[in-house]
Amino acid sequence: MATATGTRTEILISGFGGQGVVRMGQILGLCAINQGHRVTMLKSHGTETRGGYVRAQLVISPEYVDSPVVEHADVFVAFSQPAYKKFYDLCDGTVMYDPELFENVVDDAPERHLAVPATKLSKEKFSNQLFANRIMLGALTRVASLDYEAMRKAMLEVIPRFHEQNLAALDFGYRLS
Amino acid sequence: MATLTVSTRVGLVAPWVEWEKRCTDGRRLLEAGTYALTEGAIAAGCRVFAGYPITPATDIAEYMSKRLPQVGGYYVQSEDELAGMHACAGASLGGLKAMTATSGPGYTLMHDAYGWSITNEIPMVVVDAMRVGPISGITGAPGQGEFYIARYASHGGNFETIVLSPSSVQEAFWLTIDAFNLAERFRTPVTILTDQVISDMWEDLFIPADYDALDFVIPRKHNLMMPFYPVGSADLDVPPNLIGRGTGVCVSAYTHTEEGYDIEDMAAQWAQTYRLINKIRHHTDQLARYETLGLEDAEVVAVAYGANARTVKTGVLEARRRGVKAGFVRPITLWPFLDELYERDCRYVVCELNYDGQLVREVMRAAPDKKKVHFMGKSAELHTVAEVAAGLEGVARSNRVPELPYIWTEVR
Amino acid sequence: MNKLAAKYLRPSQIPTKACHGCGLGMIENWLLQAIDELGFKQENVIFGTGIGCVGRQTFATWGGDNFGATHGRALAVATGLKLAQPDKKYLIVVGDGDAASIGTSHLIHAARRNLGVTVICEDNMGYESTGGQFSPTTPANYVTNSSPYGMAEPGFDPCDVVKAAGATFVAETTATQWHQTVKIVKKALQNDGFSFVHVRFPCNENFGAYALGTRDTLKNLEWIYEHTQGRKPDGSETDFTWETGIKHDVSNSRPEFSKIMRDMNARVQADMAAKAAAAAGDDKTRDDGHGTH
């Protein structure tokens, strides 16, 4: 797994409640575990949920993870403007965002920003936006150099329904360049 | 199924270091601390859970409600927390291992049940998933405010308590089994003092395939004859009493004789107290669980338990990278307090999730020079690695914790 | 020591520590009579109590297994105990403080669950072991040490409370009704569910002395008797009347709590076995109870 520090990958996912933030983290984490990695995932709840964002902080490492706190994210998946604003500074690596959800990104590091039109593509391909999260996951799998087959398996393990569409969405996201 | 080789972390002293080596057949999951606490209890033979849902311990109740009927156990959603712990005491007296789980607001309701269970030597496990307070505080944020309350879990004095604190989801699983074992051996409630981060966080978790094969689980035994209460004795491994077998055992809230009769007499009070205190104090060697790092050459040692021990440990490693001779102590057994971990004559930086300073007072008492014990209190969020590293660097270079936002350094 | 006491109680623990003329010992004898007439064995009856006059004086008198819970929590303890020892009979003997005040929430929920215990609420109409303060069962306007101007707070009838909560046997009696009490307790003990028997008895030292102006046992008993009849010896009406007798009897009409739990377990385990058998058939089912979310 490609990482900033060599052994430790930090992934931050944040957005509003209902956007599948925690579910995405769960699939990602299970995928890493199935490949023999150690994983921590902090998920915010309670006041943070009511305050407008849900956050999943994942740390993936071949060895036991000491600090589970993401302070220098290798990848930050932002699903909302407030989440982006709040956590942008915690990211040293790539920010993935959906331009349909927000467009106002800082312009000092365009090379670190990756716009993934997941909502638009989900609407086009599946006639609704339900699969945007899976398209984003597919894109993330590519960006973070994660094992695609393992990700497919982990997703099916976690998601109980609509396996065909979910697999198609993941594939779609993974193939985006 | 999946085979796991767990790398044993250097400096970890706990029975599960050995257990992990012996358990290789099982599954690896991504699960929450609450799940691990539940499965640990089931693996340890817990067959009754009685409690009242409260964030962040609610998931334990939910998991228990699903799991217990599957293994022939009972989930009781009690009318309040003190009913929950009393029902656990009743179940345990009836011969079933029992557990309850709560957070601070429920924990403080349990004190008379604690006193009753401690006095009557009733084994059980109580989980307190601490959040920031006082009272409801911030429900979804971690705290460490019950360090002393867990020690002095009931009124009236004259007892010792056993309190353990895990710092990972995996450790929560093993430590829960350990807690049940200690409860049986010491005939007393054992408290698992965890926090919102550990209970809510998800982490890779190895679950053994066959709980029945875990030969390190201490099964429930029954004491069916006098003395029901070995007052005046510090003996370990006395089997718990059993109500329902017609032994004539008596269990009450009063100072008791060895039969369990109420008595108002100083000699009886002395004998009972000798039992309740010394069955623990005389066997502290059986109770030491801790993790250390870099104590050989440390000039400044960071001390933390539970969730923030994880960022603190990373902070220690970061400080060492910056050339600070930093060490790390993570007490897992919080009570009885492991004074021996603080024998080194050096500076200490105690990081805990409260502003009043609780753990730090015990480190001040145990350390050779209390003036060399520094405090970094934080509330509602874990210490960051950056804060810990800055704190250790500050103490190492100028004998003081630098001013940092939301970090409290004063202890009065 | 009478024959029943010799048969069922502990010689070392009786006579009890109760005050002279206290009704507790007499009522305990009546309970023994009910147990004896039903032929229950000592080892099959668990005696539980709480704190206060009733708790202190009756604890450890029973020859079998005893527990004296913290104040008000006897039923909370019994809830767990019953799950572990479902086949035992439980005689939970508590006072008006335990049942009607500090432990009322447990009383209500034990009744709701139809917990298989018989609660004998021995009510001396106030907190007498702490020197005679009023309780929720102290009659209106009577003077106690914490109602020097008369009991001003409205009270309640614990029988009404447990009936509303779902108790399957509810009765009220007094220390002046020997045979009726024995008959009622026998019925209560034959209900495989939550039974509640409210027994008022006199306290000479506090309630008698302060509320009624006498420490005379007979006069205090007479006062109770008058209030069960509604008439004074001179034919005039009393200030209020207690209706004694069986208030509610639907014994054995709905399942007992620990049985509900055991039946559920059997159902869950049968489902699991069926699923496992099906899985062995098509080898696809993954749900073994450790499933992910």
Image (cartoon, coloured by chain):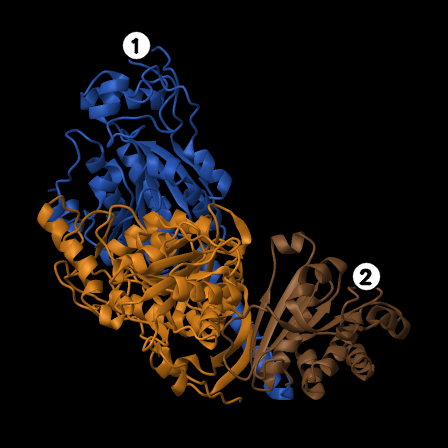
Chain colours: A brown, B orange, C blue
Q: Residue furthest left?
A: B267
Q: Is residue C190 visible?
A: no
Q: Residues within 10 Å of mark 2 (few under 14, many from 20)?
A: few
Residue B151's disc number:
none
Residue kind at label 1, given as amino acid type: Asp
Of C244 and C45, the residue lying toward us: C45
Q: Marks 2 and 1, Cα distance to the nearest angstrom?
A: 94 Å
Dot 2 lies on which element? Answer: loop
Q: Quadrant of residue B21?
A: bottom left
Q: Relative to residue C237, is residue A76 drawn left or right?
A: right
**Image spot of residue A66 (x, y percent):** 49, 74
Mark number displayed over residue C234: 1
Chain assignment, label 1? C
Q: Nearer the viewer, mark 2 or mark 1?
A: 2
Q: B244 above or below C212?
A: below
Kind of residue sitting beneath label 2? Asn
Residue B124 to residue B110: above or below: below
- The picture places residue C188, in percent across and down from the top left corner, at 37, 45
Residue A66 or A173: which is nearer the viewer? A66
- At a point 17% along the width and 46% down the height, the residue shown is C4
Q: Residue at 69% of width from left, 81% of height from top?
A: A144
Tell me residue A93's x, y (percent): 69, 74
Residue B120 lies, in percent from the top left, at 24, 56
Q: Which residue is mark 2?
A: A104
10 Å crowding of disc 1: few (<14), some (14-19), many (20+): few
Q: Are marks 2 and 1 on the same chain?
A: no
